[in-house]
Image: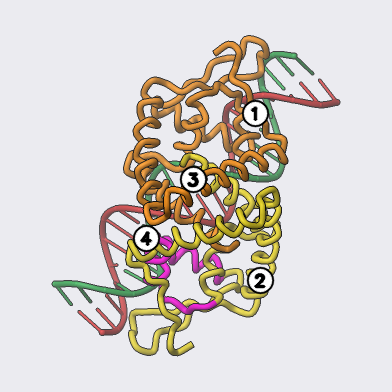
Chain colours: A orange, B yellow, C green, D red
Amino acid sequence: MDGLAQLTFVVQGALGRVAAAHEISVVQARLLGILRERRPSIKDLASFLQLDKSSVTGLVDRAQDRGLVQRTPSASDGRSVHVAITARGRELIDRVAAAFERQVADLVIDLTPAQQRRLSVSATAIVAADAQRRGIDIFEIDPAL
Amino acid sequence: MDGLAQLTFVVQGALGRVAAAHEISVVQARLLGILRERRPSIKDLASFLQLDKSSVTGLVDRAQDRGLVQRTPSASDGRSVHVAITARGRELIDRVAAAFERQVADLVIDLTPAQQRRLSVSATAIVAADAQRRGIDIFEIDPAL
DNA sequence: TATTGTTATACTCTATAACTATA
DNA sequence: TATAGTTATAGAGTATAACAATA
């Protein structure tokens, strides 16, 4: 199963090149990807990304400085903020995601369609099982959204 | 194929936790993994890791400071050095690799043995095709080794 | 002249600890 | 008291540009 580790470096490399071509980091791209459909708190993000909350503060700071995300105070908890993607952030992540799709297609081009399908299914199953195991139920969309 | 990106985050997360438990970073672990069977130059490493040579200098510096690797001058080229793993480095990467194996086994535990096998085969095929495409023929073992 | 490696510098990402404000 | 978030600080990782030594 060492091939799996190597594969993650290859895919992360592809992700890194795509992100760099759009002048963002892989982590920033991941953040924007999460925010496409959610408006999580800093704490939610820390749990989802498995990072310390102070790391998330910095991550969101830099994205906010570039106009990619916005903080809005929580209506129900005065201590909390919700992080939302901006129109500009959404436009950027859409372009990055499309470019990444093309890169991944190139990466798996030598596999048969059936192999590609099985790979996708297995990948999704592993991710879902892992999320369940660590209790990171892909958090709910904010009802206020 | 977005599942593939998610999968890389999950696997990299597992790698990160294993590495952290042994007090090294994922990149340092990757470096040591490469050096298990090779004695590359800084340039070779930069090409293999797809990093700038100055980044590799720093990477090797930190590993050397911890006694995990050693630089030795090249016999054939006065400008070049070869990076070799030390006994201590080898002992460390052996433990990390074993722990990582166990983590990956846990990750794929819900897949059938056949699915696991196909995943491994596909992963290896993608890695090999990518390496060939970018001309990174997993460089030769140093004849002087 | 070109290549190999290092150094200087700057930025991102990350964690720990201490802090503020709110619950 | 406990929790959400920020700030201060430190260290790893990365790149660019300039440099020294060798080819």
Q: Residues within 10 Å of mark 2 (few under 14, many from 20)?
A: some
Could you tell whether A49 is left or right of A115 in the image? right
Q: Residue at x 45, y 26 (%)?
A: A64
Say whether residue A133 is magenta: no
Residue at image point 60% right, 17% down: A142
Residue at image point 56% right, 55% down: B119
Cα distance between the residues tagged 1 and 3: 35 Å
Q: Secondary structure at mark 3?
A: helix
Q: Which residue is mark 4?
A: B52
**CA–CA distance in space, label 4 to label 3:** 35 Å
**Total number of numbered labels?**
4
* Amino acid type, residue under disc 3 in the picture: Arg
Residue where numbered disc 3 is placed: A117
Please tell me if label 4 and label 1 are on a single chain. Answer: no
Q: Which mark is residue A43?
A: 1
The amino acid pointed to by label 1 is Lys
Percent coordinates x, y for residue B125 in the rendering = 45, 61
Q: Secondary structure at mark 4?
A: loop
Q: What residue type is disc 2 on?
A: Asp
Assign a secondary structure to mark 1. Answer: helix
Is residue A66 in view? yes
Residue A51 seen in this snapshot: no
Callouts 3 and 2 close, C-beta under 8 Å = no
Q: Which one is closest to the eye, mark 4 or mark 3?
A: 3
| Chain containing the residue with disc 2 | B
Task: Give the labeled residue for mark 2.
Answer: B94
Q: Chain of mark 4?
A: B
Q: Which region of the structure is painted magenta?
A: B37-64
Q: Is residue B58 above or below residue A135?
A: below
Say which element carries label 2. helix
What's the residue at 32%, 43% (across, down)? A21
